[in-house]
Image (cartoon, grey):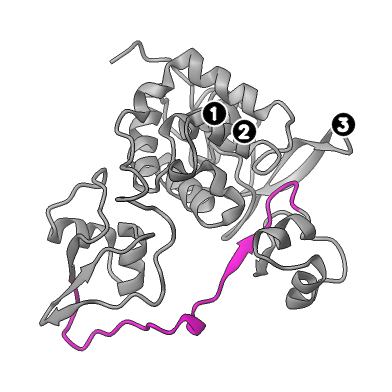
Amino acid sequence: MRTKHKFLFGAAAVALTSLGAVKAQAMSVQELAEAATPVANEYGLYPSVMIAQGILESSAGQSALAVNYNNIFGVKYTSGTPVYLPTQEFIDGQMQNVVEPFQAYGSVAEACVAQAQLLRGSFLYSGVWRENTSSYQDATAWLQGRYATDPNYAAKLNALIAEYGLTAYDGGGVAAPSTTSYATASPTSTPASSAYGLQSYTVKKGDTVYDIAAQYGVTMDAILAQNGLQATDHIMIGQVLQIPLAAASTTVSTSASAVSRTYTVQSGDTLTSIASVYGLTADELAAMNGITGNIYPGQTLSV
């Protein structure tokens, strides 16, 4: 396809002693693209942007976080055991050295899935969804000031996309919003019919295979295999999927009240910026979560 650009994953980096780190293997741009592209397409994101973020956030694969913990996106701590590393943040208009908790992943592929879920999981990042954009530049512009505090973040991503020709990976694309959508599946969706071991489900606006699988408590692979689909295929509104169930008595909750909505605080977030996304005031959001002081990256809020 093109000359492979080595990231030098596994190169010498800052020595870390916590967590018994598992080092990532050497990886090229093409190999990262092979991990990121199907995930980005499944979630309605630009593969070029995801790949560029992986390059930028990992310092071309040489950061300690990438080498030792497969965290190529610089994702702050959300669950499990945190990894504390020095980093730099723009605070009050100046770059400052800070120590922050970061997330560890078992593989680069796992990191790509987590990244996609982060970007699709909050309307804060709705400006990077392909159905809401006209080009990858719209997505990179939206990330600046939301995903990262660097005032040149979009320009850096755009430069990497141009340098490595990453738009070639966007060719798979997504269907027009009128026929395909990638937003979170509706918790009130109900299957059209049922049979022993299988249930028919008609795809609705906002559905993804991932969300349908989560709704029914089955794996994505089970649904894909049952319907002769690949992970890179896109489901369409009105398409009927067969959902394999463990038993005929399997039921699905359709109560919207049973679904809780949460948001994980990102670097640069404020109560006001988060509240505005969900139609709340800062005071309402603070009261909902019993907050009397500052919020911090990795904190989970009820919204």
Q: Is residue 222 above or below residue 34?
A: below
Q: Residue 137 has which mark?
A: 1
Q: Position of residue 147 (x, y in %)?
A: 64, 42
Near-viewer residue (80 or 267): 267
**In terms of sequence position, does the residue under pointer 1 or pointer 3 come before the other?**
3
Q: Which residues are magenta?
A: 244-269
Q: Amino acid at mark 1?
A: Gln
Question: Is residue 300 found inside the magenta-colored segment of the image?
Answer: no
Among all residues in the image, which is located at the extreme front?
178
Q: Give left or right: position of 172 versus 51.
A: left
Label 2 CA crowd tier, 10 Å (few <14, some 14–19, many 20+): some
Of circles 2 and 3, the one toward us is 2
Question: Is residue 256 found inside the magenta-colored segment of the image?
Answer: yes
Which quadrant: the C terminus? bottom right
Q: Is residue 189 above or below residue 89?
A: below
| Quarter-of-image position of residue 79 | bottom right
As helix, strand or loop, the secondary structure at mark 3 comes to strand
Q: Which residue is mark 2?
A: 141
Q: Which residue is mark 3?
A: 94
Q: Position of residue 3 (x, y in %)?
A: 35, 10
Q: Give left or right: position of 275 versus 32.
A: right
Q: Main secondary structure of the magenta part?
A: loop
Q: Amino acid at mark 3?
A: Gln
- The span from disc 2 to disc 1 (Cα, nearest Å) is 6 Å
Label 3 CA crowd tier, 10 Å (few <14, some 14–19, many 20+): few
- The span from disc 1 to disc 3 (Cα, nearest Å) is 25 Å
Are the residues at dot 2 and dot 1 in contact (C-beta closer than 8 Å)? yes
| Quarter-of-image position of residue 278 | bottom right
